[in-house]
């Protein structure tokens, strides 16, 4: 079922019409997002994807509902029609989101083979932070 | 099932052994536990110096940006060649910028971009060509001919700079990497992009 | 008010007293010991200088030491650990062997010294609070603390090791060592920053004021630590030559992105250097031709200054009264101004010789930065000791009183330990020269010195040492096949970077 839905969406995408995933549409955003632990303040509020020049372009809006700044770590996983990964593991990327800010993240697939994706998200208040080794977050931040 | 039989016999012995050493199912030969493997893709925040995360992020952003340019897409179709000039390091850190350009070239190559070597690697290439042709040790028909190396159509060039600010309690470092794709024959910059990184640390 | 006297203190002082007579003991007068060695180097007798160094560092039980034909104490790693040869022995021996062009021995000696520095680095990395905790809490003289080397010596050691690796043709090891120099500088920087914070905190707690002006008012020559040359330095440990060497090395090997920070860091430390300025932003512009080499001359002159002790009376509470008590503090004493030629002639070309490192100024800068801490430690120690003496006379009778009295004299001498065969100044000159035998000549302060060098490798460093007497010119190992292309180059020499095995 999933594969058919994806192909249909791609059919649209190839015609140049972006497919827009909205929170209202039965959790279609949720199917693309993997949260490592429960995230209270950061939410994906909008997500769009389109295939242009053979590359998958994605735009994600992350909203911070808290009035404090939040540290986000994210990365994409690139898949083909059959759900296989077509690219090596991406590095985790740090992103600082100010209080009540909506941040737009735009990416382009690193490979022509990618037709689908997953967005991995993590916020350090959760467990299992992707910090290297035993190094606690310490005083160093990336923005 | 039969194949498993000898192993079931061994199992008690193995168990006894492993119990006497330490009770673990992890396939490691650990010492005192002071060394461990980490996630190569994890966010590294040990110091404000340029680190693995910065290199990976810069390379990824540049690759994604490069792949979208029509020149690179044409280069893939027409098998036009790329090369990387040394990226200038304008920071005060001993940081080999080839780490970045090598990663970018490798990722482009996975998408079908062909590139030629330059710089330090060139010496090895020339040595090997000479060896095959001048030493008299190789069969004429099975040795690489001189004069067939191909020149690149485009080259990558750029620089990385930093601004370091130090207060009594805070250190703030701003890095900016700039990369350009230049058509060698004309000198026209066909593409350029930047990646900025800000890191700060409390003392 | 009573000053507490821990019992172990007495024992410790008595023990240090017993050790005072032996060679290898921390209470020896290092300056006196090295004066002879230095003058032997001046008159060109490096072998005798080496013998003297060995004699001064003879194991505690000299008769047991195995001797070889020349009567020299044989290298024995077992004995080394027994007699507790310190880092200074390895510093000086490495330098002497380097002058003798015995670069392998020199490298091995410096690698031993490096291991001691690395022990300190690892201790600090693993447990910074513990290492910092030792500051201000020392009750015995600075002289009996383990000597880890002054900051500038630690950095210099790494730079000197790089030179040995280059002279031996082990370029990969040189590359690793250069990165280590930079990391070492960063580590020392962080250590000193934290130490400064800690010291302030400690002094606020103890109520000890350590104003260097008070010391100067009592006759300490503080203005000697405040010359323009000292003030011009960013700190007492960063070494402009080490960075310039990295710039040179990586430029010649074609790794421009590593050469650039080398020159840039060197310029930050020596902002007026023309030689560095003409390289920043222009790396790789001036390349040698097919049969030429970009040669770096490293001209060292004179000897590092001595650390001496001066006695300054400071008020210390004794029997609840303030009594002016003579306390000793270190001062820097120059070995006399060394001669540095303004130029050097190579293959008929006149090359500018430019000073990059002034060890004398670095030592003064280091002492200047460390002085508040030294004053704090000395005063705290004096307070404790006066209490000890009082208690000993009261309870222990005459014998204990005498021991404590002698111990306070013996221990109250400032730390005189320092790497003395280091040059006073280090300068560089650079030229693109044809491969083969090249004549060079330069002024030595007492006439012209002429000699020939062999230029062969892509990376060629020629060390020259002036001593106001003997002149030493080094010669890097030239690989025969480096000159011209041959079809089957012999396999490169095995890396010899491993530290000699240490037996525990």
Image (cartoon, coloured by chain):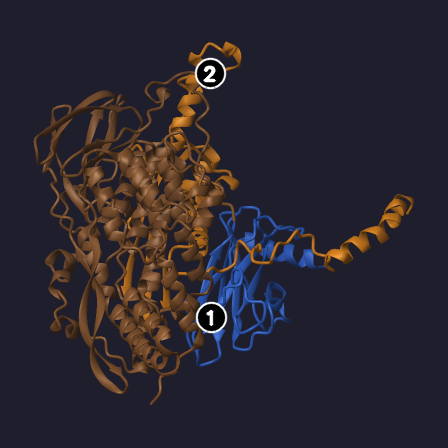
Residue located farthest toward the right when viewing the structure as drawn: B2
Task: In this rendered view, identify the residue nearer to me: C188 or C143.
Answer: C143
Which hue belongs to chain B?
Answer: orange
Q: Is residue B173 visible?
A: no
Q: Residue at x 51, y 52 (%)?
A: A109
Instruction: Provide residue A22's location: percent of width, then percent of height.
Output: 56, 70
Vertical side of C443 occupied by C225: above or below: below
Mark 1 and mark 2 residues within 8 Å of each other at the beta carbon: no
Q: Is residue B28 visible?
A: yes
Q: Residue at x 43, y 38 (%)?
A: C75
Q: Chain letter for brown?
A: C
Which hue belongs to chain A?
Answer: blue
Q: Nearer the viewer, mark 1 or mark 2?
A: 2
Instruction: Provide residue C205's location: percent of width, then percent of height.
Output: 33, 82
Q: Which residue is mark 1?
A: A71
Q: Label 1 is found on which chain of the structure?
A: A
* Mark 1 residue element: strand
Q: Label 2 is found on which chain of the structure?
A: B
């Amino acid at each position: 079922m999933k594969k058919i839905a994806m192909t249909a969406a791609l059919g649209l995408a190839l015609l140049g019409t972006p497919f827009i995933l909205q929170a209202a549409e039965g959790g279609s955003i949720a199917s693309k997002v993997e949260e490592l632990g429960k995230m209270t303040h950061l939410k994906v509020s909008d997500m769009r994807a389109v295939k242009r020049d053979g590359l998958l372009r994605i735009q994600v809006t992350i909203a911070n509902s808290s009035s404090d700044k939040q540290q986000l770590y994210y990365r994409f996983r690139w898949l083909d029609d059959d759900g296989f990964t077509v690219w090596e593991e991406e590095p985790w990327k740090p992103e600082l989101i100010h209080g009540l800010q909506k941040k737009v993240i735009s990416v382009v697939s690193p490979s022509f083979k990618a037709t689908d994706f997953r967005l991995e998200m993590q916020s350090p208040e959760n467990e299992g932070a992707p910090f290297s080794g035993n190094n606690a977050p310490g005083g160093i931040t990336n923005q | 099932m039969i194949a498993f039989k000898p192993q079931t016999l061994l199992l008690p012995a193995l168990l006894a052994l492993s119990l006497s050493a330490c009770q673990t199912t992890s396939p490691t030969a650990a010492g005192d536990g002071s060394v461990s493997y980490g996630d190569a893709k994890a966010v590294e925040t040990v110091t404000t110096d340029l680190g693995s995360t910065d290199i990976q992020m810069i390379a990824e952003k540049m690759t994604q940006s490069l792949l979208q340019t029509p020149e690179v897409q044409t280069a893939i179709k027409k098998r036009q060649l790329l090369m990387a000039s040394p990226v200038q390091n304008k920071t005060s850190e001993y940081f080999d910028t080839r780490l970045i350009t090598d990663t970018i070239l490798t990722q482009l190559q996975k998408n079908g971009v062909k590139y030629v070597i330059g710089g330090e690697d060139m010496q090895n290439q020339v040595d090997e060509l000479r060896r095959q042709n001048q030493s008299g040790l190789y069969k004429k028909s099975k040795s690489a001919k001189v004069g067939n190396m191909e020149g690149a159509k485009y080259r990558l060039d750029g620089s990385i700079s930093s601004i370091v600010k130090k207060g009594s309690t805070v250190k703030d470092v701003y890095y900016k990497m700039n990369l350009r794709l230049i058509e060698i024959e004309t000198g026209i910059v066909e593409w350029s992009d930047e990646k900025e990184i800000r890191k700060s640390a409390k003392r | 008010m009573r000053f507490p006297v821990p019992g172990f203190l007495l024992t410790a002082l008595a023990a240090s007293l017993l050790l005072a007579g032996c060679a290898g003991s921390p209470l020896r007068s290092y300056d006196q010991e090295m004066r002879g060695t230095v003058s032997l180097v001046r008159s060109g007798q490096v072998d005798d200088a080496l013998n003297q160094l060995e004699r001064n560092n003879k194991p505690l039980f000299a008769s047991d030491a195995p001797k070889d034909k020349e009567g020299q104490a044989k290298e024995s790693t077992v004995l080394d650990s027994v007699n507790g040869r310190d880092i200074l022995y390895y510093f000086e021996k490495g330098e002497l062997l380097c002058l003798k062009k015995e670069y392998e021995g020199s490298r091995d000696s410096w690698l031993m010294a490096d291991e001691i520095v690395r022990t300190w680095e690892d201790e600090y990395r693993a447990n910074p609070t513990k290492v910092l905790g030792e500051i201000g809490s020392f009750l015995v003289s600075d002289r009996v603390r383990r000597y880890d080397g002054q900051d500038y010596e630690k950095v210099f050691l790494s730079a000197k090791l790089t030179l040995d690796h280059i002279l031996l043709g082990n370029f990969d090891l040189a590359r690793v060592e250069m990165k280590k120099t930079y990391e070492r500088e960063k580590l020392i920087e962080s250590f000193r920053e934290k130490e400064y914070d800690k010291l302030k905190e400690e002094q606020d707690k103890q109520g000890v004021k350590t104003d260097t002006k008070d010391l100067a008012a009592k006759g300490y020559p503080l203005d000697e630590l405040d010359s323009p040359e000292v003030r011009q330095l960013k700190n007492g440990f960063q070494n402009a030559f080490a960075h310039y060497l990295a710039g040179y090395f990586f430029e010649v090997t074609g790794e421009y992105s590593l050469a650039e920070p080398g020159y840039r860091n060197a310029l930050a430390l020596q902002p007026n250097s023309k030689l560095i300025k003409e390289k920043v932003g222009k790396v790789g512009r001036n390349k040698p031709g097919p049969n030429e080499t970009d040669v770096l001359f490293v001209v060292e002159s004179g000897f590092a200054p001595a650390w001496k002790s001066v006695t300054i009376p400071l008020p210390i509470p004794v029997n609840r009264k303030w009594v002016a008590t003579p306390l000793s503090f270190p001062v820097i004493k120059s070995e006399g101004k060394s001669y540095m030629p303004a130029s050097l002639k190579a293959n008929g070309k006149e090359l500018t010789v430019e000073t990059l490192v002034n060890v004398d100024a670095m030592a003064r800068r280091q002492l200047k930065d460390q002085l508040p801490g030294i004053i704090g430690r000395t005063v705290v120690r004096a307070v404790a000791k006066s209490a000890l003496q009082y208690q000993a006379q009261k309870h222990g009778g005459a014998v204990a009183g005498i021991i404590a009295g002698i111990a306070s004299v013996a221990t109250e001498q400032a730390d005189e330990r320092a790497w003395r065969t280091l040059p006073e100044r280090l300068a560089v000159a650079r030229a693109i020269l044809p491969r083969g035998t090249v004549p060079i000549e330069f002024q030595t302060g007492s006439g012209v010195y002429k000699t020939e060098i062999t230029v062969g490798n892509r990376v060629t460093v020629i060390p020259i040492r002036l001593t106001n007497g003997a002149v030493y010119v080094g010669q890097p190992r030239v690989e025969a096949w480096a000159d011209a292309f041959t079809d089957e180059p012999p396999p490169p020499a095995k890396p010899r970077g491993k530290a000699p095995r240490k037996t525990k």
